Structure formats: C-alpha cells, structure tokens
Image (cartoon, rainbow, N blue to C red):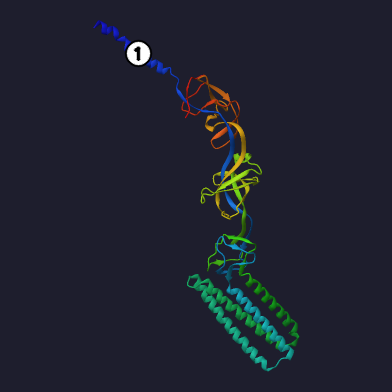
Amino acid sequence: MKKLFLLLPIPVGLLLWNYYSKRSEAPELAFAKVKREALVSLLSTNGKVEPVEWRPVRAEVSGSVERIFVEQGGRVRKGSPLLELKSSGLQADLAAAEHRIETARAELSLIERGGRSSDLAELENGLARARLSRETAEREIATLRRLQEKQAATGFEVSIAGDRLRQADAEIEAWQRKLGALAAEGNRKAVEAALRDGQAAKDLALERIAQLTLRAPMDGVAYGVDARAGSWLNAGDLVANVGRFEKLRVRVYVDEPELGRVSHGQPVTIAWDADPGRTWTGSVERLAQEIVQLGSRQVGEVLCSIANGDGRLVPGTNVNVEIRTAVAPDALTIPKEALRREPAQGCWVLVDGQLRWRKVTAGSSSVTRVQAVNGLNEGDSVALPSGRVLKDGDRVKAVYP
C-alpha cells in the first residue's frame, strides 16, 4: 500500500502536463499564399439589347387590321407591304368625292346647253328624294347610338349609318347645285370650283386609301409586330419596327459607384440565358450621361456596340454583361476576403509563426482576387477571415485550405 501511494502522483502529473501543454499550443488559422498572376478586372452587370439602325412603322390612318404580310423576325425589303388596314369611312369619302365630280360635270354640261325648263321638275323631285333619304338616315343613326349606349349595337354599325347620312348630305348638296345651275348660267365659275374641290377630295381620299397599306421604311428585320387580324388601330399607333441586326447596341446598367471604372473602348462580353454557352463581344461606345433610377438601383446607362452577324440576338433581349475594366499582366494577388479594412487597409501576415500587420495598397480586382500593389511579397502567407480576434504577435499554426 505504501508503494502504491508513492506511485499515485505520477499519472496525476502526466495529466496536468498534457492539459497545460495543450493550452499553450498555438491555435490553427487558415492562410493563403500571395501569388503572381495575370489579373483581369471584370465589372458584371446586366443590360438590354437595342438596334443601332431602325425605323418605327405607325398607322397613318385609323382602321381595322385586314391582312398581315410579315411575321415577327421576318426579313423585309424597303417598300414591301407589312400590313393592310380596312376603313369603310375612306371608301365612303372616295365615293362622295366621285359623286361630287360627276354632279359638277353634269351641271357644267347643263349650263353649256343653256338648261331646259323640263329639267326643273326632275331636279326638284330628286332633291325631295334626297331629303327623305337623309331623314331616314338621321333617324337610323340616332336609334343605333341609343342602342350602342346599351351595348346592343356596335361602333361599326354606327359608322356605317354615319356613312349613309353623309352620302345623303352629299346628294342634297348636288341636287341643290343643279337647281342653282339651272336657274342662272352665271354659276359656271362656282360649278368649276366645285369640280376642282371634288377632284382634290378624290385625290386626298385615294392618298389616304394608299396609306391603309403600311410598308417597310427600310431593308431589315421586322420586330415588335403585335397587331392581330381584326384589331383596331388608331392613326399614330405603333404597328412594328424594322431594323438591321448585324450590329446591335446594348444599354448596360452600371451601378453609380462602379461608373468610375468604365472608360471608352473597354472590351465587353455579352451572355444570354436563353442561349447558354454562347457569347457576343463588343466594346464600350458611350459613357453614361446621367444617373437614373432602375428599380431600387441608381445606375448610369453605358452604351456598348456588339457584332451580331447571324442575327441571333434581337432587340429587347435582357442580357448579362461583363466589362473588362483593367488587366494587370504580372500582379501580386490575394483573395479578396484576406484584405481587411480595420484598423487600416491591410493584411495579417505570418512571420516566424506569429501574426504581423501589414498595410496594403489595393489595385485591380476580379470577382475573387485583388491586386496587392505594395506591402506584400510573392509567397507571403496572409490570414483568411475567422471568428477569432487577432492581435499583432499572436502565435498561430498555419493551415492552407
């Protein structure tokens, strides 16, 4: 028992020694090596494709879509028809103008023959019939308007009734002119003026009827073709656009703090989520002219030109954009997360197993790495972020992930 008692302190001492030695052992800390490499600084953002050269096509007169001659993305030649409208009002205007011309010519013929007393009864009867037709047309349009308010008649039906009313007015006017011409040969100048007015009205009606066919303003590709057969278009409505797609422009949205990195001529790479693995290249063409609101972002709109030889990209496409803002061909680089902002911009460097603070001047950066312009040497070990509070002189055990 005495010997056992004397041996008892030995294992206790071993346990205490192991405990204190572990407490004094340096903690592990993740480090990365400073390495020399070519560093490409990229600014990643988004943008929207738009054509460099394009022309809008707008309806010049109102009417319903009768026929569509081109599909979205179809190639067109200048002057080729894109779409045809239908307007009964214009046809009625043409018919009324032609009726006025015929009436004026008949009046001139009557004046030239000196007129006949037997014609008076015929003219008065014709005027009475025209007035009766007008009264009928007036009652009809009033009825249709009341029904339209109750949604029991269409606007097209009201429009047709209005055409009949205008036709009756034109007939009344024509019969009255004939009576006037018969009453006095001195009306020749007035009739000749009416003939000229009728011809001008006909020319205008024919011109506006020609405008019912919308044509391509240039060679190119039709896009934004949203019209559907039977739909109604008002004068001035946008029908389609025609543009050239061999060269496109991308409106790139650059966040305000990043605008200082962008300069004219920098290379640009475009990617489209709908065509994975495919890229388009170009360059910065125009810098931002102002700051605008884009959702929750304050951005400058930078314009970039890109080649699009096969026409795969189309205007309106949302794309991903990378602008190569700088290239450092032989740079000392460290992981971005190793560069700390406090107590000043710098890094914790491992020197003989101890942490030493180094001030570092940063240069260009990529998505994951940053250039160390000064303060570090190739092969130095810089500490990566951890949950520990680090102090100058701390002993640590380096671990390289």
Nearer-the-camera pick, 165 or 128? 165
Query: Quarter of the image holding residue 36?
Result: top right
Nearer-the-camera pick, 119 or 391? 391
In this picture, residue 338 sits left or right of residue 192: left
Number of marks present in the image shown? 1
Assign a secondary structure to mark 1: helix
In this picture, residue 383 sits left or right of residue 204: left
- Residue lying farthest bottom? 118
Q: Which residue lies at the image location 58% right of the left edge and 45% below the top edge?
A: 269
Q: Which residue lies at the image location 65% right of the left edge and 85% below the top edge?
A: 175
Nearer-the-camera pick, 20 or 87? 20
> Considering the image in quadrants, where does the N terminus appear?
top left
- In the rendered image, residue 345, in percent from the top left (x then y), is placed at 57, 28
Q: Which residue lies at the image location 60% right of the left edge and 76% below the top edge?
A: 91
Looking at the rendered structure, the kind of residue marked 1 is Leu
- In the rendered image, residue 141, in percent from the top left (x then y), is placed at 54, 76
- In the rendered image, residue 154, in percent from the top left (x then y), is placed at 51, 72
Pointer 1: what residue? 14
- In the rendered image, residue 15, in percent from the top left (x then y), is placed at 34, 15
* Other residues around mark 1 within 10 Å, as few (<14) / some (14–19) / many (≥20): few
Say above or below: 105 vs 300.
below
**Residue 255 visible at all:** no
